[in-house]
Image (tube, rainbow, N blue to C red):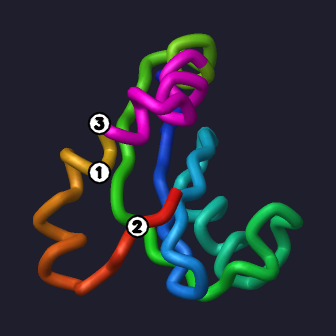
């Protein structure tokens, strides 16, 4: 069974979240890191700070959509709070 992943990157340039989904997390992160994804090309360097595995694409898409909402962003900030505090990151997104 192929898994789909919802992932969260933080830009070290602007300290904002980027939320996406993929079925190949390692490859997708490599594309982001190399500047081959238009939406994050100018926001590099990026750090993968969170991901979730889903059993199908529909669930991953719904989760991605939720994490992009105000409530989803609050959830993420709370979920990765320790990383943010330890790294002195001041999230703006």
Q: Is the stretch drawn in magenta largely helix, strand or loop?
A: helix
Query: Quick check: marks 3 and 2 in contact, CB under 8 Å?
Result: no
Number of other residues with Cα within 10 Å of mark 3, as a class: few under 14, some 14 to 19, many 20 or more: some
Magenta part of the protein: which range? 62-74
Number of other residues with Cα within 10 Å of mark 1, as a class: few under 14, some 14 to 19, many 20 or more: some
Up-down relation of residue 12 to residue 19 (above or below): below
Q: Earlier in the sequence, mark 3 or mark 2?
A: 3
Note whether residue 3 is visible: no
Residue 91: x, y in percent?
40, 67
Is 68 in the magenta?
yes
Identified at 48% across, 64% down, the residue is 92
Note whether residue 51 is visible: yes
Residue 72 vs residue 38, the one in the foreground = 72
Is 66 in the magenta?
yes
Q: Secondary structure at mark 1?
A: helix
Between the C-alphas of marks 3 and 2, the distance is 13 Å
Residue 4: x, y in percent?
53, 32
Residue 54: x, y in percent?
42, 24
User: Looking at the rendered structure, which numbered label has been put on residue 75?
Assistant: 3
Residue 12: x, y in percent?
51, 85
Between the C-alphas of marks 3 and 1, the distance is 6 Å
Query: Quick check: marks 1 and 2 in contact, CB under 8 Å?
Result: yes
Left or right position of 56 against 34 = left
Residue 10 vs residue 74, the one in the foreground = 74
User: Looking at the rendered structure, which numbered label has been put on residue 58?
Assistant: none
Q: Which residue is mark 2?
A: 91
Query: Quick check: marks 3 and 1 in contact, CB under 8 Å?
Result: yes
Up-down relation of residue 19 to residue 15 (above or below): above
């Amino acid at each position: 069974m192929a898994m789909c992943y919802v992932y969260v990157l933080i830009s070290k340039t602007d300290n904002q979240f980027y939320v996406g989904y993929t079925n190949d997390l390692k490859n997708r992160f490599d594309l982001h890191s190399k500047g081959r994804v238009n939406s994050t090309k100018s926001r590099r360097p990026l750090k993968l700070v969170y991901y979730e595995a889903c059993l199908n694409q529909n669930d991953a898409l719904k989760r991605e959509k939720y994490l992009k909402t105000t409530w989803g962003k609050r959830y993420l900030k709370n979920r990765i709070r320790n990383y943010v505090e330890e790294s002195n990151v001041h999230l703006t997104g």
